[in-house]
Image: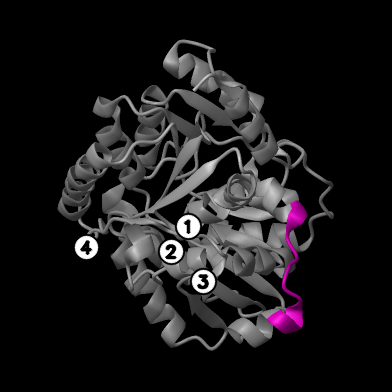
Amino acid sequence: MKIGVLTSSRAEYGIYYPLLQRLKNDPFFELEIIAFGTHLSVEHGYTINQILADGFEVPHKLETVPKGDTSFDISSSMGLTIERFAAFWSKHSFDVVFALGDRYEMFAAVSAAFPFNIKIAHISGGETTLGAIDNAYRHAISLMSTYHFASTDVYKNRVIEIIGSDENVYNVGALNIENFIQQKYLSIDAFKERFNIDLSLPSILITFHPETIALDKNVVYVEELIKALEQCNAYQLIITMPNADTMGNVIRAKLNEFIAVHKNAIGVESFGMLGYISCMKYCAFMLGNTSSGFVEASFFPKYVINLGDRQKGRLLTPNIITVPIEKEAILAAVKKIQSAPQLSNIFEYGKGDASEQICQILKSKNI
């Protein structure tokens, strides 16, 4: 079975990883990775190198990254992505193509595939993020897909509502969990050697993206975040940079200005999957508005201060503390975590066998 896998960013590649390993090692499947988006952007860490370093071949590379972060830039990038994938799909055929998540560039690639009647297998459908335009892209990808691999029963049922059918809709759990069970994490010493960051210090892992529904408020939001971070002197602040979203560069610039004048702040463009989850394992807690604060953080488990509405609508587990993006609210949440009880294990996202389930389901289909 010839399988294509669409990957456009560092974050979603990390989620794919256990599935890519299984597809690569099973002779039933012929795997071809299709890399585009920020994987091919030097500014965003040229993360295609991580895919290659992990031992995967990348036979297909399409340059589609936007030139900037304005609404025009993002929209133009979507048009370019559709155009380049239209040419790509006209020349390459697959039995099934995987698409993960909700990014605008993933939506564009799938949109270009739809007129060719290509069978799309959508991972992580049914989730809801009301503070980001990704919410619409995710549901649209579900409508254009043939197979649906959701991470919880709640999300499976939402996919069924969206597409109006329960055919080929499965709850397989989250691929991320499989990553964490199998992974050999970097030790604190190994992490320091690789990234020059000492995780023996009390640390906050911070990832903050723009709210793409409330564009006009993002400057105020990042300024409120920075005001709160200025009061977190007891912690080492490990700040990963935002995605290539509308106004992402504005937030990036503000964060870099803060990092430049605060000795306890460290900016990281991309840890890679192993580095990121190792950092999560040892950090005191997470702060921001990233989806990794939900599935990934639930595994360890880690407390997460979830900011604003970007992730509004996602399944809330006991480790999530959601607050408005205001200095005092953020600091109150930090104080709450400092005296909070130790978290119990959270099992909302499956047992860590998602890739095995996905491959068995595909083998059972008459494709």
Q: Residues within 10 Å of mark 2 (few under 14, many from 20)?
A: some
Secondary structure under the numbered disc 4 in the rendered image: loop
Answer whether labels 1 and 2 touch (C-beta < 8 Å).
yes
- The residue carrying mark 1 is 326
Using the numbered discs, state the Cα–Cα distance from disc 1 to disc 2 in whole angstroms: 5 Å
Q: Is residue 358 above or below residue 296?
A: above
For residue 224, which numbered disc appears in the image? 2
Q: Which residues are magenta?
A: 181-190
Instruction: Report the residue at 72% width, 35% height from top.
Output: 348
Which marked residue is nearer to the observer: mark 4 or mark 2?
4
| Residue 85 picture location, percent across and down | 25, 44
Answer whether labels 2 and 3 touch (C-beta < 8 Å).
no
- The residue carrying mark 3 is 239
Which marked residue is nearer to the observer: mark 2 or mark 3?
3
| Residue 115 picture location, percent across and down | 24, 26
Mark 2: amino acid? Glu
Mark 4 or mark 1: whose residue is earlier in sequence:
4
**Residue 265 falls left or right of residue 99:** right
Mark 1 or mark 2: whose residue is earlier in sequence:
2
- The residue carrying mark 4 is 68
Q: Is residue 9 visible?
A: yes
Using the numbered discs, state the Cα–Cα distance from disc 2 to disc 3 in whole angstroms: 15 Å
Answer whether labels 3 and 4 touch (C-beta < 8 Å).
no
Which residue appears farthest toward the top when viewing the image? 165
Mark 3 or mark 4: whose residue is earlier in sequence:
4
Instruction: Report the residue at 73% width, 50% height from top.
Output: 299
